[in-house]
Image: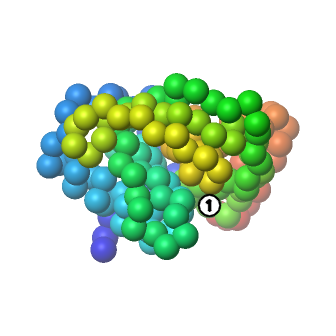
Amino acid sequence: MTHRPFVMYPHKALRTPAAPVTEITDDIRAIWDEMIGVMDAMPGYGLAAPQLGIGMALAVVDASTKRGQAMRLANPVILHSSVEPRAHEEASPNLPGVGAKITRPRAVTVRFMNADGVWDRHEFVGLWATSVQHQIDHLAGKMYFDHLSRTKRDMLIKRAAKLRG
């Protein structure tokens, strides 16, 4: 399956907040289908539309062990975050070859428009929670490394640039 290429950091699409989706159409469903194919091929646990240069508030998440459990989210917003933290190694195909351990809330309750165009809410825990928070960051124009200190972030970006040559 061919798909749109990943935009590479520091592409403007990665730093621009995504536009809200007003309704779920066949075009939106097709974008979600493409995103799930890309996510499964990476392999990854989630993908946000801006990573493919699409400026819409769309994300997919699948942290299941056997795949095929992808959740489709439009306009996701965190309503509640647990106090308990969880650290996990995060990375992005938009800045290949590097990653960093990021600490985020262990569980989050997210409100979103689902594939049927209905507002829904879901509690995500563990790797699911990490992934959905990572995607929501992308939709806000943030990258995972924005959670690092300036020194660590600069080192990570320089290391990625060296790997690209």
* Vertical relation: 111 (above or below) 158: above
In the rendered image, which quarter is residue 127 located in? bottom right
Residue extending farthest right: 151
Residue for point 49% across, 73% down? 66
Viewer-nearest residue: 117 or 155: 117
Read off the residue under disc 1. Answer: 96
Residue for point 27% across, 52% down? 31
State which quarter of the image contains the N terminus. bottom left
Q: Name the colouring of the figure.
A: rainbow
Helix, strand or loop under label 1: loop
- Asked if residue 156 lies left or right of residue 76, the reply is right
Give the percent coordinates (x, y) of residue 26. Answer: 14, 49
Give the percent coordinates (x, y) of residue 29. Answer: 22, 51
Determine crowd level at label 1: few under 14, some 14-19, many 20+ residues with C-alpha closer than 10 A: some
Residue for point 81% across, 47% down? 155
Residue for point 52% across, 64% down? 64
In the rendered image, which quarter is residue 119 located in? top left
Residue 53 showing in the rendered view: no
Give the percent coordinates (x, y) of residue 110. Answer: 48, 34
In the rendered image, which quarter is residue 112 located in? top left
Residue 89 showing in the rendered view: yes
* Vertical relation: 154 (above or below) 165: above
* Vertical relation: 4 (above or below) 72: below
Give the percent coordinates (x, y) of residue 159. Answer: 76, 56
In the image, what residue type sits under mark 1? Pro
Viewer-nearest residue: 54 or 30: 30
